[in-house]
Image (cartoon, rainbow, N blue to C red):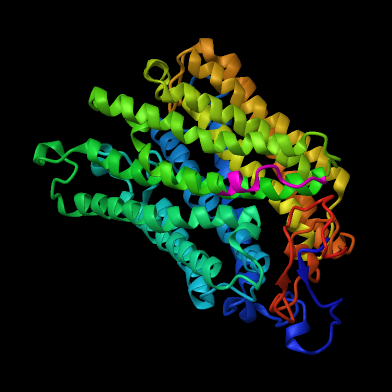
Amino acid sequence: MSTATLPGPIPHDHDVGRINYLHSHRGVMSWVYTLDHKRIGIMYLAAVTASFLVGGVMALLIRAELIDPQLTMLPSNKVYNQLFTLHGAIMVFLFIIPSIPAALGNFFLPIMLGAKDVAFPRLNLASFYIYVVGAIFAVISIVLGSVDTGWTFYTPYSVDTQTSVVMMTMGAFILGFSSIFTGLNFIVTVHKLRAPGLTWFRMPLFVWALYATSIIQVLATPVLGITLLLLAIERVAHVGIFDPLMGGDPVLFQHFFWFYSHPAVYIMIVPGMGIISEIIPTFARKPIFGYRFIAFSSIAIALIGFLVWGHHMFTSGQSEIAVMIFSALTFLVSIPSAIKVFNWTATLYRGSIDLKTPMLYALSFIFLFTIGGLTGLFLGALATDIHLHDTYFIVAHFHYVMVGGTVMAFMGGLHYWWPKMTGRMYPELLGQITCGIVFLGFNMTFFTQFILGSQGMPRRYATYDEQFQPLHAFSSVGALVLGVGFAITTAYLLWSLWKGAKAPRNPWGSLSLEWQIETPPIHQNFLETPVIEGMPYDYGVETGSGH
């Protein structure tokens, strides 16, 4: 069946509405001033990919230093602190948060809704340039003296350190506006620009995920902005907001920061879950199991995520009642995520599974995110968190959620939609092999760190006891394998732009709306507004709409 009534194949003539978005206007300036959501998504994709590669190189330098228990590559502990701070800040603020919503979401959300663009195209372009300005501030801070506080900028050290905290935090402050504008744009687009027949419960689950994420972006990001602004004021004016010598409270900064940053974890992971909800039914050739449960669980994660920030602070001296409440809420927020995992697994059951590259990344996501979620329960339990807090167990858990979750989903979505975005196919066998390399390298790197943390290895140390050296060395070898996997992926995707086979309109046989239009999409997506007649996941379901 088809999800929409659409015109037939669209001829490529000189009518602007019929011309491929990549060729509708040529030249660099046509990209600089573009209001086309697809081009803005491509520019975001290029920017976040560059950030990912820079942050990844820093990660490899960190792991290379940790092969030996003593400093060997870096000149001092301070430089090591600067390196892991930059790695964390670049990966979180410049890559993970914007990677799926701003890049893939910008490209596909309007198409999935049957719209010609987002609700506010100029605001969309402005959000990209705000992102660029924020990134420039972060780069300038590196030149002026890289921050060594960790990406969380904890007080009181961030108030006293002689590094460029103000410039870096202002970069993050500016990036927040980009996130807010994108979220606002998506919310209005979902409410106002859905095609005829596209009811709330016919929307693709990727759209539901972006909608839930946008709610978090709009409500939580201002808290981070105010917090970082207060930190800058504290450094410049010494007003005593966080300085205990002047009547301030350094733990207050942690409350403010994590009130944003825990919901921000879901800004990172919920869009990835949306991608998995698109890939699984497509390559299992089955309707998604429990559509409404998955849709509502995205909203539940967005709402409950605002209530659990205190589980980052079990060792900060909170009251016993507060830590018990935050522990209980931590277990509660795991339920919507578990619903998704169970429903994806049920969708796979007895499906006609096609192990193409996007599906391999989706299966990797389910496996790795499940490990990340289960270890999160260990950290949500007071008895174990006290012992595991600030150890490498935390590092491993965070990366299983963020890299094993968000990055694997991003890679899956990138491979899934690459033919539609570029009109070119990548080498499928090489994609499958590289997914295996990435999966192997990731587990070598971070599962080892669960063992390190459980044995008492603290995080953020450049030097360590020699008993941990074999595990650190094994983890570093895994990081190299992981880096090789990502390097090969970058190479063959770029190769495909020039040498890849021309992509058909719908190479995966998907029923969702974006696959029913031209490849690559025409300038305004549709010549006529489509009329939605069915669900995007009705694989194997006979309806009256025909084939």
Does 330 sit left or right of 254 as displayed?
Answer: right
- Check the image and report above or below for 324 versus 99: above
The answer to which quarter of the image holds residue 23 is: bottom right
- Check the image and report above or below for 96 versus 497: above
Of 422 and 195, which appears nearest the observer?
A: 195
User: Can the viewer see residue 438?
Assistant: no
Which quadrant is the C terminus positioned in?
Answer: bottom right
The answer to which quarter of the image holds residue 323 is: top left
How many numbered dots are placed on residues in this image?
0
Does 224 sit left or right of 287 as displayed?
Answer: left
Residue 195: % across, % down: 64, 72
Residue 114: % across, % down: 67, 71
Does 347 sit left or right of 38 as displayed?
Answer: right
Of 312 and 67, which appears nearest the observer?
A: 312
Of 132 and 257, which appears nearest the observer?
A: 257
Q: Which residues are magenta?
A: 285-295
- Check the image and report above or below for 7 versus 442: below
Which quadrant is the N terminus positioned in?
Answer: bottom right
User: Can the viewer see residue 81?
Assistant: yes
**Residue shown at the point (32%, 46%) measured from the top left:** 163
Outermost residue toward the top in this view: 467
Outermost residue toward the left in this view: 246
Residue 118: % across, % down: 57, 72
Taking the magenta stretch, the answer to whether it contains residue 403 is no
**Residue shown at the point (75%, 58%) measured from the top left:** 418
**Residue shown at the point (38%, 15%) measured from the top left:** 383
The answer to which quarter of the image holds residue 451 is: top right
Does 377 sit left or right of 310 as displayed?
Answer: right
Residue 213: % across, % down: 50, 53
Taking the magenta stretch, the answer to whether it contains residue 286 is yes
